[in-house]
Image: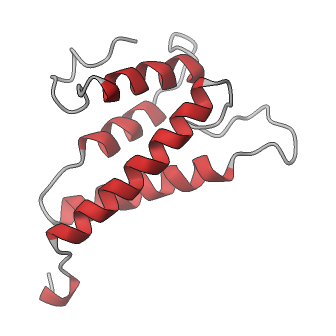
Amino acid sequence: MDPRDQIGPGQLDALSRAFSEQLLACLDECARGRNGLFSESIDQEEGQSWPAAARLRQLAIALQAVFAQQDERNALCDEFLDLCSMHGECHPGERRLARAFLERIERGEVGSQSEDERKPW
């Protein structure tokens, strides 16, 4: 990698904080009933999309790539993208996922448990 492409630790921290703030805002809105945070809702009417959620998913993918280039991980980003990949009728709804994820963040559990232990859903 070209040294000019290196991102400093301060920049990684700033990116992480910006992502975290946006994620918490979207999780709060989703927990209150708005759909489309973890995936595009296929039954939404025209004009009912959630652009902030789509941007957050794109930011998470980009942030994950930046951290990977630095041989680092961002547990919050990784877990959010993991939740975005969940689909199927046996998974809980977005509102429930958002509330559970917010609770885990508030308790400081994101990134601290093994893969099997951290998924209460």
Q: Quadrant of residue 6?
A: bottom left
In the rendered image, residue 97, in percent from the top left (x then y), is placed at 49, 21
Q: Nearer the viewer, residue 81 or 74?
A: 74
Side of 24 relative to 70 (left or right): right
In the rendered image, residue 114, in percent from the top left (x then y), is placed at 15, 23
| Residue drawn 47% across the image and 27% down it | 86
Q: Nearer the viewer, residue 6 or 32?
A: 32
- Residue drawn at x 24%, y 64% is 12
Q: Position of residue 88 (x, y in %)?
A: 55, 19
- Residue lying farthest to the right in this orientation: 46
Quadrant in which the N terminus appears: bottom left
Residue 49 makes an appearance in the image: yes
Q: Is residue 42 left or right of residue 65?
A: right
Residue displayed at 25% across by 70% down: 11
Q: Quadrant of the C terminus?
A: top left
Q: Which residue appears at 49% of the width and 20% of the height?
A: 99
Observer-nearest residue: 107 or 66? 107
Asked whether the viewer can see residue 85, the reply is no
Q: Is residue 46 above or below residue 6?
A: above
